[in-house]
Amino acid sequence: MPYADLPDVRIHYHLDGDAAKPVLMLSNSLGTTLDMWAPQVTKLAEYFRLLRYDTRGHGQSQVTPGPYTIAQLGADVIGLLDHLGIEQTHFCGLSMGGITGMWLASTHPQRIRRLVLSNTASLIGPPENWTARAQKVLADGVASIAPAVVSRWLTPEFAQQHAQQVAQLEAMLSATPVAGYAASCHAVRDADLREALKHITAPTLVIGGSGDLPTPPADSAYLVSSIAGASYVELEAAHLSNLQQPERYTAALLAFLQQSDQD
């Protein structure tokens, strides 16, 4: 399995698709791994060199001492791109991955071709909730919060009909290293990208979920109104819309990413 040894962290990543095609990077949400993008891989890899990675402190990437910052997580992306010799990429991030995308597009605009901000917000509060969650997992383990967190990732109706998927998500979340999860809670808590939005120049698509509780449609609307020229797609889904509506999610990505830059 490929790893990139960056100056202060080892990042696990995976490449799919033809190396001659444009690069599309996918960034996972808090408490998941690059496997959260499994429903999208086959189709997207037909059109892109698909780059997935485990965020610092997650999956098979290294757990370094926390707390983390979004700037730190964004710098990991730049380091991984440099390691692979990739000058420019499309970037799609969901939730925490979307916050990372906002930071990247506002501070390293030359590296981002097209940006997809999925089920995310420029500020996800209140901060005391993140502090309490970090303390909870440090005391009792990530499994102690898994059922409650996953219940917000999918709509109740969908979860009832897909018990196996719920179990898989709870297992993925529970397997997240405690220290990495807690450190990432602090990164999300302290991230305020509202001012950064006006500096994003990449063509941007915002994807929201009609039943998303952590980052509701109002958060998506704020992103759309704050980023010049941003477009919006809303899916009938909760927080992990790429899993609840995989075909429509993938279709929305392809429709946006395959536009010419002159469109």
Image: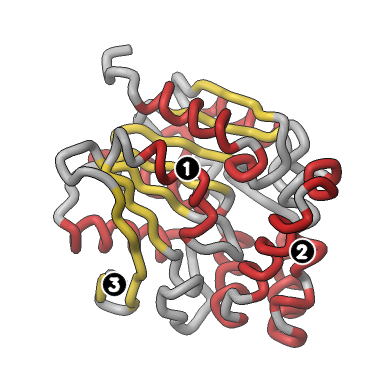
Question: Could you tell which of marks 1 and 2 lies nearer the N-terminus?
Answer: 1
Image depth: mark 3 or mark 1 in front? 1
Considering the image in quadrants, where does the N terminus appear? bottom left
Can the viewer see residue 120? no
Residue sitting at x 45%, y 30%: 253
Residue type at mark 2 is Asn
Image x and y of residue 173, in percent: 65, 68
Spatial CA span between label 1 and label 2: 31 Å
- Asked if 159 appears above or below 148 in the picture, the reply is above
- Using the rendered view, name the quadrant where residue 62 is placed: bottom left
Spatial CA span between label 3 and label 1: 22 Å
Marker disc for residue 129: 2
Q: Residue furthest top?
A: 263
Residue type at mark 3 is Tyr
Q: Is residue 250 left or right of residue 48?
A: right
Disc 1: which residue = 40
Mark 1 residue element: helix
Disc 3: which residue = 3
Residue sitting at x 85%, y 46%: 156
Image x and y of residue 203, in percent: 38, 26
Question: Could you tell which of marks 3 and 1 lies nearer the N-terminus?
Answer: 3
Image depth: mark 2 or mark 3 in front? 3
